Amino acid sequence: MQGLIHKHKHERKAAKEAEEAVSGGAVQTPRSQKFLEKLLDRITLLAGILGPLMVFPQIYKIFSSHNAAGVSALSWGAFAVLDIPFIFYGIYHKDKPIVITYAMFCVANSIVAVGALIYK
């Protein structure tokens, strides 16, 4: 999912304005297309929130058992560091779902890495 290219809201708006200028009037987006776009936006936001939450069972297991056997602090730390460019990408493009998702992943991955270091 990280490698997919998507149109940002401002790009979609610019494309729509260009179509309006060429056609000389307002271009109507079919109702079903608007519905699908809204639905996809909501599903993506939900997945962006639920994805990072899937790390919490690992966090709970490490900190409740005080045991991080088999958990690589290096890998989880690298995951956290690799989330940072995506946070800046989302900020630059003013894309809240990307910022929220990767900020949550960064925090969750960092907690696992710290737990792996503490309870090694």
Image: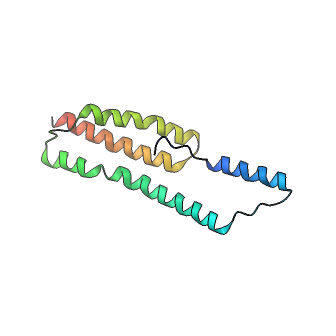
Residue 90 lies, with reference to residue 51, above or below; the image says above
Please state the total of marks drawn on the protein image: 0
Q: Vertically, is 33 above or below 60? A: below
Answer left or right for 56 relative to 119.
right
Q: Is residue 7 above or below residue 39?
A: above
Which corner quadrant of the image does residue 77 belong to? top left
Report which quarter residue 76 is drawn in: top left
Quadrant showing the C terminus: top left
Residue at 26% from the left image edge and 41% from the top image edge: 112
32 on left or right of 3: right
Which residue lies most toward the right here?
A: 24
Spot the residue most to the bottom: 31
Residue lying at 59% horizontally and 66% vertically, measured from the top left? 35
User: Looking at the picture, how far across and down is residue 70, in whole percent?
Assistant: 17, 38
For the point 27% across and 31% down, the residue is 74
**Whole-percent x, y for residue 53 in the image:** 34, 53
Q: Residue at x 57, y 39 (%)?
A: 92
Indicate how the structure is coloured in the image: rainbow
* x and y percentages locating residue 26 in the rendered image: 80, 61
Left of 94 or right of it: where is 3? Answer: left
Front residue (pair 117, 86): 86
